[in-house]
């Protein structure tokens, strides 16, 4: 996922204010209305000029990216599979 890779690197992210972008990035991206060219321009201008905000967002992004690690993916998938097999054993 491009957004997760960018977050893991601490790179500045611009993302449309639509799912799944907001779910993936949470507080770790600059959001814009994808059908509003002026909003896109403001987001681009902000990400180019506001170095403090970029620094803060970079830290948030690196932390957020950890949620999407392969280890977490495996653990969450295993939980689902275990739940399914346990429910199958309990079914009449």
Image: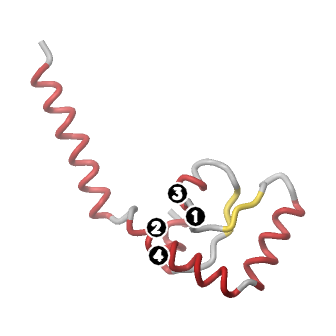
Marks 4 and 1, the one that precedes in the sequence:
1
Q: Mark 1 points at which residue?
A: 27
Q: In percent of the image, x 88 and y 61: which residue is there? A: 37
Quarter of image, res 31 = bottom right
User: Whole-percent x and y of residue 28?
Assistant: 57, 68
Residue 36, position as x, y percentages in the image:
86, 55
Cα distance between the residues tagged 3 and 2: 8 Å
Q: How crowded is mark 3: few (under 14 residues within 10 Å), some or many (20 or more)?
A: some
Snapshot quadrant of residue 3: bottom right
Q: Residues within 10 Å of mark 1 (few under 14, many from 20)?
A: few
> Please, is residue 64 above or below residue 22 in the view?
below
Q: What is the count of numbered marks?
A: 4
SS class of the residue under badge 2? helix
Q: Are marks 4 and 2 in contact (CB under 8 Å)?
A: yes
Determine the secondary structure under disc 3. helix
Residue picked out by circle 4: 62
Mark 4 and mark 1 residues within 8 Å of each other at the beta carbon: no
- Left or right? Give the position of 62 relative to 49: left
Q: Which mark is residue 24?
A: 3
CA distance separating discs 4 and 1: 11 Å
User: Mark number for residue 64?
Assistant: 2
Q: Which of marks 3 and 2 is nearer the N terminus?
A: 3
Q: Do the residues labelled 2 and 1 touch (CB within 8 Å)?
A: yes
């Amino acid at each position: 996922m491009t957004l997760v890779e960018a977050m893991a690197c601490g790179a500045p992210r611009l993302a449309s204010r639509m799912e799944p972008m907001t779910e993936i990035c949470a507080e770790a991206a600059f959001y814009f209305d994808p059908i509003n060219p002026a909003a896109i321009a403001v987001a681009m201008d902000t990400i180019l000029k506001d170095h403090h905000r970029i620094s803060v967002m970079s830290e948030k992004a690196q932390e957020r990216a950890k949620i999407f690690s392969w280890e977490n993916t495996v653990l969450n998938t295993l939980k689902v599979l275990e739940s399914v097999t346990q429910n199958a054993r309990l079914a009449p």
